Amino acid sequence: MMIIVMRLLVIATGLVLAACSSKSDDSIEKVSSAANAESSLPITVYSSRAEHLIQPLFDAFTEETGTEIRFITDSEAALIARLESEGNSSPADILLTVDAGNLWHADQLDLLQPVQSDVLQNNIPSQYRAEGDTWFGLSLRARTIVYSTERVAPESLSTYEALADEAWHGRLCLRTSKKVYNQSMVASMIVRLGEPATEEIVAGWVANLAVDPLSSDNRAIEAIEAGICDVALVNTYYFGRMQSDNPSIPIAIYWPNQESSGVHVNVSGAGLAKFSPRPSDAIQLLEWLSGLSAQEQFAGLNLEFPVNPEVNAVDLVDAWGGFKADDIAVANFGAMQSDAVRLMDRAGYR
Ligand code: FE
């Protein structure tokens, strides 16, 4: 069967989005209005994940099942706003995005619906899905410490909390607190340690910053390489990409909190849209994404960890060694996120 994947790339800025939205809507509604006719119509995925990370998977699904997938990529905020404004006429079957906080937010806005699936229940540990099974983690990302192998002895590292100690004064790089990854990480600390202790730690991090918070995890790793700072908190796949480009990069991963709470782990994941025109095909896609071959590919494409415990990470990721992960349910991150944002503001974390 011929594979035709229709692509609608919506440009991320609001103005451009507004300017081209009528065109996009037209082509989508065409599919939607015919969706109840026959089953050979495509599944529609709204994705905040980049095209090159999802296209190969969708192609493989289509090849296996004959069901085509069309997808729209945009920022999660734009996709969520779009789902909201489209309401029950939305052509979206699936929302695919990163960070449990974003998935939780979509769920709070009642944009998703529960999925009863033994396959998903079996493939995805309960801590990585919504309590009501409205969304499911599909890959795991560890937010951990990276350090200069030239200036830091790994024995001097221990926990996230300890990066607030005097010893790290002027040596720490952080990404901006506006990034949801940091909001989720601080949210998990609030759950575990309470607000006063978390605020003290975050204020300690701020006091130890070598430079103002950076715009991306990549900038933070590059700042270590440039000698601007010695340690940073980043998602491992950013480091993995740099390491795969430059295997001798003088930076390494450290797994903190191994004697206590474990490494902070978040998800990328997906949920069934509340008004999905093709729910059974969409569920089939979700189940397929949680299965063995898709998990291998999905985690490999972005150097993440598979959410399905039966699947191994790719070699480069595996080489970082095993670690104990925090066992908190990632759904907590969303619920605590506004508290985390306020706390980071009070602590002077910009
Ligand atoms: Fe990322």
Image (cartoon, rainbow, N blue to C red):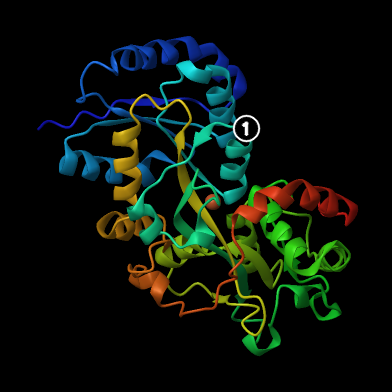
Assess mark 1: CB under 8 A from ligand 1? no
> Which quarter of the figure is the N terminus placed in?
top left
How far across and how far down the image is residue 312, in percent? 34, 70
For the question of whether residue 32 can be seen, the reply is: yes
Residue 91 in the figure: left or right of residue 210 = left
The answer to whether 169 is drawn above or below residue 279 in the figure is: below
Task: Tell me if mark 1 has few (under 14), some (14-19) or many (20+) residues whose alpha carbon lies within 10 angstroms of its own.
Answer: few
Q: Residue at x 41, y 27 (%)?
A: 276
Count of labels in the image: 1
Q: Quadrant of residue 201?
A: bottom right
Residue pointed to by mark 1: 109
Residue appearing at x 70%, y 49% in the figure: 335
Nearest the eye: 59 or 215? 59
Residue 55 visible = no
Q: Position of residue 212 (x, y in %)?
A: 79, 55
Q: Secondary structure at mark 1?
A: loop
